[in-house]
Image: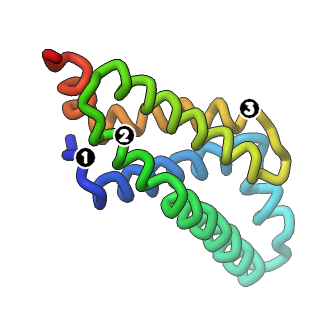
Amino acid sequence: MLTARFRNIVLFVFVKYVVFAIVLAGMNDRFKTLVTDRSNTTADWVTNTFHYCMYVLLVIIVFIALFSLPYWLVFRIRNKVLFVLAVVLVLSVDSACYVWFNVTGNVRYGEIDLLVGVLTLLVFFFKPVRQKIIAHP
């Protein structure tokens, strides 16, 4: 469990999107379609894999820049009802932004992003979330 410091929030957003990218790479043979099928030689495969990873890293950096501060601000909220509403709002906006920025605009990816976000949030910040929700007013 981590404390809700800004660097931990940045790490959380990074890991969230790395896990999400791994999940997406396996869905519908996305990695196979974008890398393996376009490679004729080992050098092509290495080059395509590098380009795929750089693209994913660029997207992750954009989402870190967009959502690290909102997630950090959510953990500054003391009221438990407002905290829960703010977590739901930021996770939902995060997922909606991914769907909106995504070329395909597939809503299913947003749902998966939301699920990965909730699970990653609980893995990283279970104790602070529990303390915020169970804490006495």
Please tell me whether mark 1 or mark 2 is closer to you in this view.
2
Q: Which residue is mark 3?
A: 108
Q: Report, in whole angstroms, how far the alpha carbon at label 3 lies from the one at label 2.
A: 26 Å
For disc 2, the neighbor class at 10 Å (few under 14, some 14 to 19, many from 20) is some
Q: Which residue is mark 2?
A: 74
Q: What kind of residue is marked 1?
A: Ala
Viewer-nearest residue: 137 or 21: 137
Q: On the rendered image, what quadrant is the N terminus found in? A: top left
Residue 65's x, y, as percent? 51, 63
Please tell me whether mark 3 or mark 1 is closer to you in this view.
1
Colouring chosen for the image of the structure: rainbow
Is residue 107 among what the camera can see? yes
In the rendered structure, find residue 4 and report the number of the disc placed on it. 1
Residue 136's x, y, as percent? 14, 16
Residue 68's x, y, as percent? 43, 55
Q: What kind of residue is marked 2?
A: Val
